Image: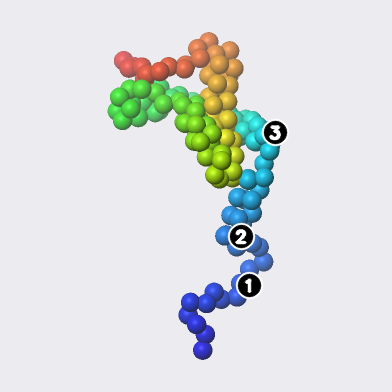
Amino acid sequence: MTNRFETPPSHSVGPTTSSLMQQIVTLASQLNFADVVISGIALALLMEAITLGLRFGYGLTANRHTAILGRVTRDIRVHHGYVGLLAGFFAWGTSCWLQALANGLAILAMGLVLSDVVHHFLVLWPLTGSHEFHLRYRREG
């Protein structure tokens, strides 16, 4: 009779979820500064490509399509760069006790901040004539 609390033998070919997560954490904890910077830039480029597709492919604009969030934020626009700054603060604060988390937060922070800056000042401003980096939602109509 088998113990019902024993883990049954695994017949899967690939890594289990927990071993995959362990591999990701191990890899993330071993990143050096250059790896973090390159990963952050790559994430920023990916986010900007998605943002451009939504903006120019589907015609979505923050003032029109996210204005409902103004009710929650008291009309203050929360740019994703702000979230990136917060993630950067947490990355700096966690760097001494959990390197994988610190590196992941640093990559996220860099990606969010760079994506926001690139989108508003290097893409929107030249293409539309306005950087659209508003601190508050504008009331239309």
Q: How is the image coloured?
A: rainbow
Alpha-carbon distance for marks 1 and 2? 15 Å
How crowded is the residue under tag 3: few (<14 C-alpha within 10 Å), some, or many (20+)?
Answer: few
Inter-mark Cα distance, 3 to 1? 39 Å
Asked whether, in this view, residue 47 is left or right of residue 67, the answer is right
- Whether residue 43 is situated above or below residue 12 in the rendered picture: above
Q: Secondary structure at mark 3?
A: helix
Residue on which the image places disc 3: 34
- Residue displayed at 65% across by 32% down: 37
* Residue at 47% over, 17% down: 133
Q: Which mark is residue 19?
A: 2
* Camera-side residue of 14 and 66: 14
Q: Position of residue 28 (x, y in %)?
A: 63, 45
Q: Amino acid at mark 3?
A: Ala
Crowding at dot 1, Cα within 10 Å, few <14 / some 14-19 / many 20+, comes out as few
Residue 16, given in percent of the width and then of the height, sits at 60, 62
Outermost residue, bottom side: 1
The residue indicated by pointer 1 is 11
